[in-house]
Image: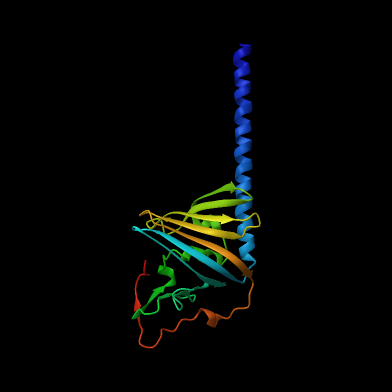
Amino acid sequence: MRLVRGIRGTGTVLAASLCFALQAGAQQNEAVVRKVEEHYNHLASLRAHYVEHYSGMGMEKSEEGTLLLKKPGRMRWNYAAPVGKVFVLDGKFGWFYTPGDAQATRVPAKQLDDLRSPLRFLLGHTQLQKELDNLAVTSVGAGFRITGVPKGMAERLKLLTLEVTAAGVIQRMRLEETDGAVTEFAFSGVEENVPVKDTDFSFAPPEGVTVVNGLPPV
């Protein structure tokens, strides 16, 4: 009888310890998510250098340039090569253009599923738990890794990973598509609350370039 009671007592202690550990882990995860949300909710604009690496469909390529964000809902990716390649989100439409193309693509912002679009959640009132399904947080060195699937993109994306500092700053973004392709963005030289104008996010197609409505290019 004493042995049975001892086993039961030990089981109770282990269960309580496990429950406490799970609660502590959940609290830490919530604290990390709140840190990211609070950091970006206090920003009005942001400028950063980015390096983009794509691997998939039997090919690999790397590009880089400058990212500019402004609340509410504005984003501009200026590519360094080829000069003039842009992805612009003006708050209403997403624009895609590469120099030499005869057409520029325009997509309503609400229909946009471009791989750069997950960063849009930084352009409003950031609520990661509402923006990402299956949200999880793990410690990585001095920072953290946040994973999840952006709502409405499950058919295209298998996993989104954000690597953030202890201060809640996003340093890397990795997107794993359902077809196995992987796109990674690394951010550096971040400048916060920089002076920007709405006109910085306008796009006018070059002379002779027609505008077509449709899905963004791969």
Residue most extreme to the top = 1
Please tell me which residue is depicted at 36% across the width and 69% down the height of the picture. Answer: 217
Please tell me which residue is depicted at 60% across the width and 54% down the height of the picture. Answer: 33
Residue nearest the observer in this picture, 169 or 109: 169
Q: Position of residue 73 (x, y in %)?
A: 52, 72
Q: Position of residue 31 (x, y in %)?
A: 64, 51
Q: Position of residue 64 (x, y in %)?
A: 49, 68
Residue nearest the observer in this picture, 204 or 3: 204
Please tell me which residue is depicted at 37% across the width and 80% down the height of the picture. Answer: 100
What colour-coding does the image apply? Answer: rainbow
Tell me: residue 99, above or below residue 41. Answer: below
Q: Quadrant of the C terminus?
A: bottom left
Please tell me which residue is depicted at 53% across the width and 61% down the height of the picture. Answer: 186
Residue most extreme to the bottom = 207
Q: Quadrant of the N terminus?
A: top right
Q: Position of residue 99 (x, y in %)?
A: 40, 79
Tell me: residue 114, above or below residue 181. Answer: below
- Which quadrant would residue 81 be assigned to in this image? bottom left
Is residue 58 toward the left or the right of residue 140 in the image?
Answer: left
